[in-house]
Amino acid sequence: MSRELEIRYSSRTLSRTDRFRHLQRLGCAIAGLLERLPDNLRNGPEAQLLSTIADRKVCNVVHLTYRAPSHEGHSKDYEFSRLSMEQRWRAGYYDAVRTLRHPEVLRPPTNRDGVLAADGRE
């Protein structure tokens, strides 16, 4: 049951990251198209609406995977006692600190979708 939960949450994370990457690519593509439009079209209502999502921003997404202690078992997705939460927060903090020791996770992405998705480092 614990493994099933891990797979379910991992699949959801990957799906959301893929969706985010797709939206980033759309925003960049729209920005490129709007730049090439003649002024009379660029100032029209359709272009103005599209400009609200046109963006060439870049993002780094770092996946930190919680590794539950063996005593948690399958209750980790609904057990929210103060002690459990403090342990999880502390684990997340140290995962973030370890990850940020690897400068490559902070380098701006250079791919066409403007998203760098990386796993947290051990």
Image: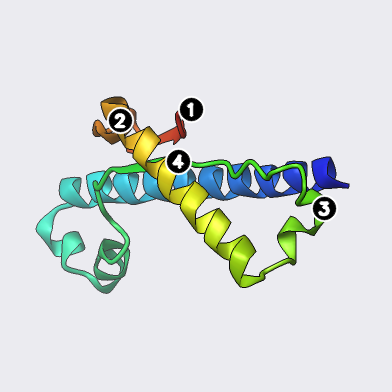
Q: In the image shown, does 92 or 61 lie closer to the viewer? A: 92
Q: Which residue is mark 1?
A: 122
Circle 4 sits in a helix, a strand or a loop, which is it? Answer: helix
Name the amino acid, label 3. Answer: His
Circle 2 sits in a helix, a strand or a loop, which is it? Answer: loop
Residue 48, position as x, y percentages in the image: 24, 69
Q: Residue at x 88, y 47 (%)?
A: 1
Drawn side of residue 39 relative to residue 56, left or right: left
Residue 61, position as x, y percentages in the image: 41, 43
Residue 51, placed above or below residue 120: below
Q: CA distance from mark 1 to mark 4?
A: 8 Å
Among the two numbered marks 4 and 2 on one chain, the one whose residue lies closer to the N terminus: 4
Q: Residue at x 77, y 48 (%)?
A: 71
Q: Are marks 1 and 4 in contact (CB under 8 Å)?
A: no
Q: Which mark is residue 95?
A: 4
Q: Are marks 4 and 3 in contact (CB under 8 Å)?
A: no
Name the amino acid, label 1. Answer: Glu
Q: CA distance from mark 1 to mark 3?
A: 23 Å
Neighbor class of circle 3 (other Cα within 10 Å; few <14, some 14-19, many 20+) is some
Among the two numbered marks 3 and 2 on one chain, the one whose residue lies closer to the N terminus: 3
Q: Which mark is residue 101?
A: 2
Residue 81, placed above or below residue 59: below
